[in-house]
Image (spheres, rainbow, N blue to C red):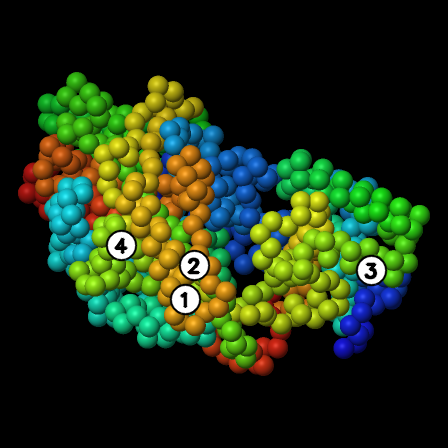
Amino acid sequence: MIEYDAIVIGSGITGGWAAKELTEKGLRTLVIERGRNVVHRKDYITEHKPSWEMPLRDARLSVGTKGAEEFPIQARTGQFRESNKHFFMKDAKNPYIEDKPFTWIQGDQVGGKSLIWGRQVYRWSDLDFEANLRDGHGVDWPVRYADIAPWYSYVERFIGVSGEKLGLPQLPDGEFQPPMEMNAGEKFVKVGIEKAFPGRHVTIGRVAILTQPLHGRLPCHYCGPCERGCSTGSYFSSQSSTLPAARATGRLTIVPNSVVHSLIYDARKNRVSGVRVVDTNTKATREYSARLVFLCASTLATTRILLNSTSPQFPNGLANSSGVLGRYLMDHHFLAGAYGSIEGLLDHYYQGNRPNGIYVLRFRNLGDDASRRDYVRGFGYQGGAGREGWGRGGSGRGFGVELKRRLHDPGNWSFGMTGFGECLPREDNYVTLSDKTDEFGIPLLKIHCTWGDNELAMRKDMAASGAEMLEAAGCTKVRTYDAYTGVDQLGAEPGFAIHEMGTARMGRDPKTSVLNAHNQAHEVPNLFVTDGACMASSSCVNPSITYMALTARACDHAVEELKRRNL
Amino acid sequence: MLLGGAISAPTLMGALDAATRSTWTTAQGWAPRTLSPAQLELVAVMADHIIPQTETPGARAAGVHRFADTLLSDHYPASERDQFLAGLANVDARARSRHGKTFVECTADQRVALLTEMDDVAYPEGRSDAADPPPDTWFFRRLKEVTLVGYYTSQMGATQELHVTPFGVYRGDIPYSSVGRAWA
């Protein structure tokens, strides 16, 4: 057994942050990663590869097609393509059971999903942190915006975020680099919406992509597909940012190809004493020990580890006397919205593949006359405008020279957007362990999650309000859409937004929550959970930066507690 | 316009330009894995009608037929592959019943007429937003899609007919006249 000061399980967005913070604070830290190693730059094997050098021309690999055979779950997401499939989990490596459709998109490499994430970053506000208390769904967050705000700033200054300051309480500003520019179609829609609906705001996406150099990383060069990996480190990933910082301390060790089976609990000391690991290549087991354990394995993987860490004191999973571990699973619900055409602007065009879109801030249930009676909480929209490309030739009549001439020029402008809606924390959305085990001897996760009445009512408004705004802005041929077609159907099922969170929530009361205000297990002081599992509600904004801020804050607390000999 | 608004006879008659010849030359050693030589030629001829040579090379020169064979071999589920192959057979059956020859053997005018028929049926009333296109037109719509993808993501299509947006800066609002071609 090798002794470390701290063990971090997972090397993705939060694991990388925990590694950086703990090593920089002087702790010899071991990062355990179930996936293979991915080396910055060297292993971005499709970066900048032109379409014609890929046999399928970077086809979207959908379920059932050749090329997606090993990824029957991962291929559900539109993100999964020929050029990035090597950054997704081969599903047979980590099967799970869907009680109801739930799409679990996973990375399986050092860096985790930080290599392929959407990079949109929005601060929460007290609108979010107070939501549970205000309407009674879920338990009250043990923190408020003032507790987290300095950590948002700390994180933003390190990762680099470009965006526009708005001075609005529902979406607090951050430490921004200059924003990316909107295109002409987006400016048209922004002006139209803001004129027709005072109090509604359209802004360029706030995104963890540099527009200025930062810590040796270069500004974006607008090649487009970030998720192939970025050698200039222009978007935040563990590889480009946190892991190099941790490595620079000389106190970081990473072991890839090592899946955590369970945590070892020392009842006499009431501490986690170590971690049981299975080598994914040899199936050999190993143990590591440390004074401190951070679970950053991703929401569901983290909870699975805790559920599988049983002992006489914790027969239902470590730190789970409350019985809430595994419950209150959430995701954002999306793919309901509207799209339309913009007439004219045909002398306007753009240059560069901007890996970012626009954001329409939440405007519902802010306590004003835009509030609703049919649902609580709210949603924002993500979307963008562009001119139609050559693909439009496939949707209408015509061929030959006439078609080729027509496709030589870009087509009309169109604008589309999807809501991202908050999901309520509900006890009957939960995960448990199955009797079946995977090839590493770890019980499979069984997931039961459905949208509730509140989400479904909100979706109607996401579509209708989207159309209403686009029409008011002067768009034509406006249509609504909603990809959700029923509780047993794929299309906009839970998990599909890849914002799964909850199941080991923070709270004030050990009887109703797993973690305290510092992401520390109420019952096991040297155990911290800082990935999405910790969330007590979901807000409607993309969650990753909140995970990062909570992680940095928890590391600070953990090291202080170590110094005080409380751990 | 170099060739006028109609389908140009030269491209149909196999008067290959230098780029086209070089494509065949570099294709030595390459052999289709799903399509027969006759099917491959049928795809090449149809694709070249859809995106013909103009000032820039057309679909055949860009190797769309080889891309189609790759899709059929390495991407399509068996059911879609078979549906595509059946669609090719139907094209020849239609040409035979009308003209007593395979599609490739037909004259250029005959081929254009056959394609126009298929195109008209595939996109009812020329509407692009028809809710449910007629099911028996799946093949033609798919062939057109394969042709467009194969052509515009090829090096010729992306860099000669259109152009690839340069790396470096993003400019959100520039005059289209300063670009003059769609980005690939």
Residue B47 against residue A291 in the figure, above or below: below
Q: Quadrant of the N terminus of chain B?
A: bottom right
State the CA–CA distance, disc 4 to disc 1.
Answer: 19 Å
Q: Residue type at mark 2: give it.
A: Ala
State the CA–CA distance, disc 3 to disc 2.
Answer: 39 Å
Residue that appears at 60% across and 55% down: B130
Look at the numbered disc 3 and give the secondary structure of its residue.
Answer: helix
Residue that appears at 29% across and 42% down: A453
Look at the numbered disc 1 and give the secondary structure of its residue.
Answer: helix
Residue assigned mark 4: A378
State the CA–CA distance, disc 1 to disc 3.
Answer: 41 Å
Which residue occupies the foreground of this view, A27 or A199? A199
Look at the numbered disc 4 and give the secondary structure of its residue.
Answer: loop
Circles 2 and 1 in contact, beta carbons < 8 Å: yes
Q: Residue type at mark 4: give it.
A: Gly
The quadrant holding residue A520 is: top left
Q: Chain of mark 1?
A: A
The reply to whether residue A2 is visible in this rendering is no
Q: Are marks 2 and 4 on the same chain?
A: yes
Circles 3 and 2 in contact, beta carbons < 8 Å: no
Look at the numbered disc 2 and give the secondary structure of its residue.
Answer: strand
Residue A456 against residue A461 in the figure, above or below: above
Residue assigned mark 1: A470
Residue A237 point in image, percent of width and height: 37, 53
Circles 3 and 4 in contact, beta carbons < 8 Å: no
State the CA–CA distance, disc 3 to disc 4.
Answer: 54 Å
